[in-house]
Image (tube, coloured by chain):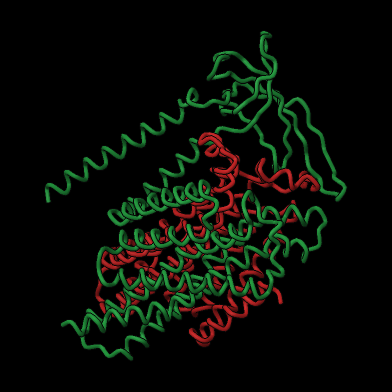
Amino acid sequence: MNTTLVLAAILFLLMTLIGGKKGARSFFAIFLNFGVIIFVLFFMNDPNINPIAVTIIACAFIGCINLFFINEVNIKTITAFMASIITTVILIAFIVIMAEKAMIQGFGEEEIEELSIFSLYIGIDFVKVAASVVIMSTIGAITDAAMAISSPMREIHYHHPDISRKDLFQAGIGIGKDILGTSTNTLFFAFFGGYLALLIWFKDLSYSPGEIINSKIFSGEMITIFCAGIGVTMVIPITSWITAMYLVKIGNSAE
Amino acid sequence: MKNITRNKIYFYIVLSICIAASVLFVQNNDSFYERTIAKVKEVQIVHTEKTTDIYDNEDRLYEQRITAEITNGKAKGQEIRITNQYSKSKAYDNEIQSGQKLFVSIKDEGADNLSGDILDLKRDHYILLTGWIFILILLFVGKKQGLFSIISLIINAVLLSYSLDVYLKNPEISLLLIGSAAVILFTVTSLLLANGFNEKTYAAIIATLAATFLSLLITYLVIWLTGGKGLRYEELQFITRPYKMVFLAGLFIGSLGAVMDVAITMSSTLFSLYEKNNSIPVQALKRSGMEVGKDIMGTMTNILFFAYISGSLPMLILYIKNDSPLGFSLSMNLSLELARALAGGIGIVITIPIGLFTAIYFITRKRAQI
């Protein structure tokens, strides 16, 4: 039996056992997201299509899957969706600049030996691909944080319909502060775990600190971690603001 | 009140001094490097050419002639000439721009005009810049909690580096054992720093550790029973040590953050329900806990999925552009990442019932004490 298949089967079993119908839907969402990644891959292989455009469209699809498919279309998910897209667009502008300046695209000298059989002149803009990778690694965490803020804000507005826009915004920021530590932590450990082999490699081959910091792979990973952190932090005020605007405006016009 | 604002002002002054000093330092730290650094003064493109590889991929090659000034070491102040080739796609080359700093090797010592090759780029100030932007945004949005999360991240990074040192010095101790010790320390420090010393935190710590070890056990058993079939360890990069152990330890640490997140969400929800209504029945706690668990499990598993899978995109593009079949490219590049994401997902999902029961245990114990 294939190990990945067995793990997938166990995950599916646990998710339906614990989450019921919603659990099964969450499991199916992973598959849909995998499908989106395959599509991204497919479009990025065309040198005439801008990878950044592909990424932004893909992020919109992923937002739909994570928010509208797992949950449902309602005020909470709509505001979370808008906030995720706005954050993604701002973040991607920043990342493109950083990736271009720091030149962290493509492959490092540590990887190049095993790639000697490949032709590297394939006409794909790897700087843009690098920026896409950073955004795609963070999109799951961004939609999660957006949902974690818009959902309790909706509850607060429901229980206190007279709350002012400013107070509701402040409440959103307050919730955001509470989840900030855990969301950055989730991402950091995920990346640390993925880079464990690399860290051991650097230490084993006794790289000097200067060589580690300036190497393409390490600085690429550090910039990814920081940008991911910037993304999940930035989504907090953006979601709070959009949700506050949306909810309080609707409240007023109904009166 | 006055004291608080004064402390705040001190804090911002110290922070801005730190930023200014560190930025100044990395811009002028060339003499601390052993490798020779040169600052690019002039760049000229001397040759361009269109290429087509055997798979009909079109690209453009450029040749640059670079004049740079050496900024450290014996040859400081001297000019150096470098030629650099790069392609439009830049998979393994870079377009050098003037003003940039490069690590170079000097080839022709003694002559008036030095020549050399590019070893690497100096990237330290970009890392510093993004790092500071991250810290500032975190402080701006999170204030005190932001500061605590920065401290907890720094402690975790130091702990990780230290435990790797211990492993490298004592290779006879299993990486999993050291990883386990590190995981306990990570969990205790992160959760205590974020939530303080209280029963809510203790419940989350116990749930995190139980769920992490249980999920590791499940993954280990699955890999053992299936003989690791379908896992392409040969694609695990940067391997200097027994690869299975490195993979398992990475998987273990990678899911820890997500598991902690779920555990603290479960225990905060249940404790806040209990605090609002001290006599809330256990059945009601169970029901609410499971509802919250259902809500978070989908998005949490997707966080890990994207964090792991996206990194393989550049390699996948390279494979496919080199005419590798899609199935082969996917299984080569994604088998380990998928296994990691699925194992992390298993950890997240089993944290929900474990977190529920530890929190209920602590709540009933607290109730009995009153």
Report the residue at 27% width, 90% height from top: B281
In the rendered picture of this protein, how many numbered marks are placed on residues?
0
**Is A15 left, or right, of B325 in this rendering?**
left
Report the residue at 52% width, 76% height from top: A68
Q: In the rendering, what colour is chain B?
A: green
Q: Which of A246 and A185 is in front in this view?
A: A185
Residue B199 falls in image quadrant:
bottom left
Picture quarter with the C terminus of chain B: bottom left
**Is A40 left, or right, of B297 in this rendering?**
right
Report the residue at 74% width, 38% height from top: B87
Point out residue B40 in the picture as x, y percentages from the top left corner: 60, 24
Taking A32 as reference, is B239 above or below it?
above
Q: In the rendering, what colour is chain A?
A: red
Point out residue B252 in the picture as x, y percentages from the top left corner: 51, 64
Residue B114 visible in the current orientation: yes
Q: Nearer the viewer, residue B283 or B155?
A: B155
Point out residue B326 in the picture as x, y percentages from the top left corner: 77, 64
Report the residue at 81% width, 53% height from top: B322
Outermost residue to the left: B2
Q: Nearer the viewer, residue B27 or B197?
A: B197
